[in-house]
């Protein structure tokens, strides 16, 4: 399972980077564009999209395909 991180770069662009990768997968002008691309990758790889805010802190985490069904508890 590969988690996809959406992070802002120093030049103001937004990047999608696979967890543990040394390079960005893609760069985008807006955070929304980066989130959409990260979602496509996460659905394909059954992973999570972890969105970071401008300050680098995690803002949101969405899971695509790795949730147990039915939910436990």
Image (spheres, rainbow, N blue to C red):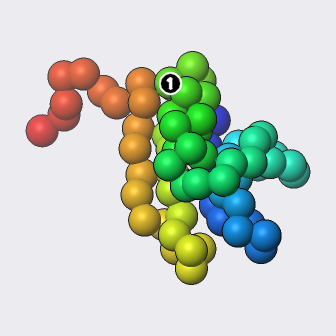
Q: Work out whether 72 lies above or below 30.
A: above
- Residue lying at 50% horizontally and 49% vertically, measured from the top left: 32
Residue lying furthest left:
73
- The residue shown at (55%, 27%) is 40
Q: Under tag 1, what secondary structure?
A: helix
The residue at 56%/74% (across/down) is: 54
Q: Nearer the viewer, residue 73 or 51?
A: 51
Answer whether residue 19 is visible to the viewer in this image: no
Quarter of the figure with the N terminus: top right
- Residue 33 screen position, x and y as percent: 56, 44
Q: Quadrant of the C terminus?
A: top left
**Residue 63, relative to residue 31: is it above or below?**
above
Q: x, y percentage for residue 70?
A: 19, 22
Q: Residues within 10 Å of mark 1 (few under 14, many from 20)?
A: some
Please say if 49 is above or below 64.
Answer: below
Residue 2 appears in the picture as rendered: yes
Q: Nearer the viewer, residue 8 or 11?
A: 11
- Looking at the picture, how far across and down is residue 59, in whole percent? 43, 65
Which residue of the protein is positioned furthest toward the right in this rendering? 22
Q: Residue at x 56, y 79 (%)?
A: 55
The residue at which mark 1 appears reads as 43
* Left or right: 19 as drawn, with respect to 23: left
The image shows residue 13 at horizontal and vertical percentages of 71, 60
Residue closest to the far bottom: 55
**Looking at the image, which is closer to me, 66 or 26?**
26
Q: How many marks?
A: 1
């Amino acid at each position: 399972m590969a988690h996809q991180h959406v992070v802002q770069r120093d030049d103001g662009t937004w990047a999608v980077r696979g967890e543990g990768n040394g390079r960005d997968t893609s760069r985008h002008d807006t955070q929304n564009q980066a989130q959409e691309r990260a979602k496509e990758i996460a659905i394909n790889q059954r992973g999570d999209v972890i969105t970071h805010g401008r300050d680098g802190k995690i803002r949101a985490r969405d899971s695509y395909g790795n949730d147990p069904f039915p939910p436990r508890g």
